């Protein structure tokens, strides 16, 4: 039995497409398998995929629907698609057995290597690669065609299709036209390397990973597999469309700048600049000129006119990190700017209007600072319109493995993996330095490991070398971290004790005391 897709234009048959195991992309874009040249057709209207053994229609963000025989599917104003089969009579429908799970294991494409690498999740839709600004993965390289190649994923399988590129698409040293990729495959596009990797995330009982990630500038990403962090990402989606000032709070190294960049990337200002300034890392006498700029001759050393970060971020987002360190006189001036978004350079009499969304972050308790007189109350309420609290890493242990695997993909030897014991040792550590400390430890463990599998001993040595607290922190975990560990291991005392490398009886006594304290 062989399925074919018949294309009709204004009721007349135009072309027949044979449908095999590879998905067919339908749309107006030139790289589509079934190209429809009419303004009423979007660039990518849908995809025809094999779901449960039968052709189905997949629209982005929706579950696939079966494509029955001899029932036309209308695309745009003038086109129709019809599924026909040589061995099945018309007006009959093949029974569908949904053997391919909708939540199939996910993969990602890593673009580049090292600290500048970017990771793009394959979410079931086709991802185009090319030099054109409309490409999903844009590569600014003269040797790359405008639309160079396309990744297609379905049911845990990934295909790569060359789009008649000038210099070809290469997989593991071979030039290809269309090929199914395996995990670890290396793709060469122009002078850039891409790599197919498994999506990060802790899995249990064969369940698929539910990790999520948001792309941001500079190769940084937000990796989330825990309920707490997924809740934060839902807040990011909700607040990104607003133009209000936002206040991100959380411990140092927890990922506040990543959240700020995600607010920018997911909002209407994504095509504008993202300018970051650490208010706590600049001498007090220079903060004003960094914020608002200065005119030539405004003070000794001002040899030229310079714009401040407010002007540099015009049309985009200004991220002010460690806002709690801003001196009180500048808090008053910042409040006036937020009222009308007019800035005046140091030494100038002229105000300039700017269009900026201000996102601030701090590791300090601003409410407590307001009570103590260290932070203006009116500025606090001005910034607190869209608050986002980033939980520390010790309160979202499901993220530890996902983040560690993501960081391993950015190392010199990206094929390294964590052993089960190494993963447990990472989970047991309370991470006072949060994600930043985790990345340093994972990088060191990858460097120390003599094999591709990182052992628990490699992690232990990396903690000793990198962490300020080292392995001793495991023996002195607080009640909150202990509760997270118990939840992570589904309250299995044996697994938790093995992770902490303590006797089960010792852990049982600690848990009993913890429950008694909660009961009081």
Image (spheres, grey):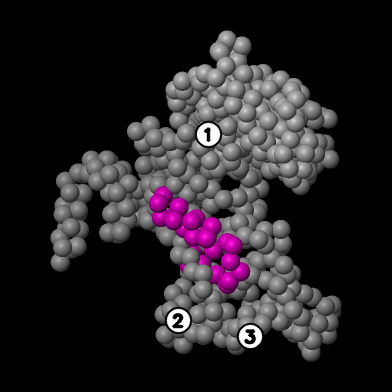
Residue 517, relative to residue 440: is it above or below? below
Q: Is residue 219 above or below residue 166?
A: below
The alpha-carbon separation of the residues under discs 2 and 1 comes to 53 Å
Please provide percent x and percent y for residue 392.
42, 59
150 and 14: which one is in front?
Answer: 14
Residue in front for this viewpoint, 449 or 345: 345
Give the residues in magenta.
226-252
Q: In terms of image quadrants, where is residue 493?
A: top left
Is residue 237 rendered magenta in the image?
yes
User: Which residue position is annotated with label 2?
Assistant: 369
Task: Tell me which label, 3 or 2, sits earlier in the chain.
Answer: 3
Quarter of the image with the C terminus in it: bottom left
Q: Which residue is mark 1?
A: 64
Camera-nearest label, 1 or 3: 1
User: Does the rendering let one see residue 431?
Assistant: no
**Rendering coords of residue 476 (x, y %):** 30, 57
The numbered mark, 2 or 1, whose residue comes first in the sequence reads 1
The label number, if any, that marks residue 336 in the structure image: 3
Give residue 231's position: percent from left, percent from top: 44, 56
């Amino acid at each position: 039995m062989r399925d074919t897709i018949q294309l009709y234009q204004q009721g007349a048959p135009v072309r027949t497409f044979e449908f095999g195991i590879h998905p067919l992309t339908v749309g107006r874009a030139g790289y589509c398998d079934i190209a429809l040249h009419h303004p009423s057709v979007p660039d990518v209207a849908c995809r025809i995929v094999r779901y449960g053994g039968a052709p189905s229609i997949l629209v982005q963000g929706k579950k696939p629907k079966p494509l029955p025989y001899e029932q036309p599917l209308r695309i745009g104003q003038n086109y129709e698609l019809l599924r026909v089969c040589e061995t099945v009579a018309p007006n009959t429908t093949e029974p569908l057995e949904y053997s391919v799970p909708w939540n199939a294991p996910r993969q990602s494409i890593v673009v580049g290597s090292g600290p500048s690498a970017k990771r793009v999740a394959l979410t079931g839709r086709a991802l185009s690669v090319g030099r054109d600004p409309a490409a999903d993965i844009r590569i600014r390289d003269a040797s790359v065609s405008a639309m160079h190649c396309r990744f297609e994923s379905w049911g845990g399988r990934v295909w790569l299709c060359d789009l008649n590129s000038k210099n070809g698409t290469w997989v593991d040293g071979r030039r290809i036209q269309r090929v199914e990729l395996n995990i670890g495959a290396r793709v060469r596009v122009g002078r850039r390397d891409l790599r197919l990797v498994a999506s990060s995330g802790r899995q249990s009982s064969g369940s698929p990973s539910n990790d999520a990630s948001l792309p941001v500038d500079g190769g940084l990403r937000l990796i989330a597999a825990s309920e707490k962090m997924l809740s934060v990402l839902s807040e990011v989606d909700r607040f990104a469309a607003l133009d209000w000032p936002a206040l991100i709070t959380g411990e140092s190294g927890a990922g506040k700048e990543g959240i700020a960049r995600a607010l920018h990337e997911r909002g209407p200002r994504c095509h504008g600049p993202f300018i970051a300034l650490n208010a706590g890392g600049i001498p007090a006498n220079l903060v004003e000129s960094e914020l608002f700029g200065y005119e030539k001759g405004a003070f000794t050393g001002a040899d030229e006119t310079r714009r401040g970060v407010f002007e540099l971020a015009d049309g985009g987002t200004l991220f002010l990190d460690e806002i709690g360190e801003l001196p009180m006189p500048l808090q008053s001036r910042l409040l006036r700017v937020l009222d009308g978004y007019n800035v005046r350079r140091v030494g100038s009499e002229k105000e300039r209007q700017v269009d900026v969304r201000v996102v601030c972050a701090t590791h300090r308790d601003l409410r407590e600072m307001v009570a103590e007189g260290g932070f203006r109350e009116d500025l606090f309420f001005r910034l607190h319109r869209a608050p986002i609290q980033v939980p520390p890493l010790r309160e979202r242990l499901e993220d530890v493995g996902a983040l560690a695997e993501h960081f391993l993909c950015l190392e010199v030897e990206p094929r390294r993996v964590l052993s089960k014991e190494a993963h447990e040792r990472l989970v047991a550590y309370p991470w006072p330095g949060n994600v930043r400390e985790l990345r340093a430890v994972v990088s060191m463990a990858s460097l120390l490991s003599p094999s591709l599998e990182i052992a628990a001993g490699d992690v232990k040595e990396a903690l000793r070398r990198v962490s300020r607290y080292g392995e001793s922190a495991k023996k002195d975990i607080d009640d909150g971290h202990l509760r997270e560990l118990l939840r992570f291991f589904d309250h299995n005392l044996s697994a938790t004790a093995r992770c902490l490398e303590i006797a089960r009886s010792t852990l049982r006594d600690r848990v009993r005391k913890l429950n008694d304290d909660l009961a009081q």
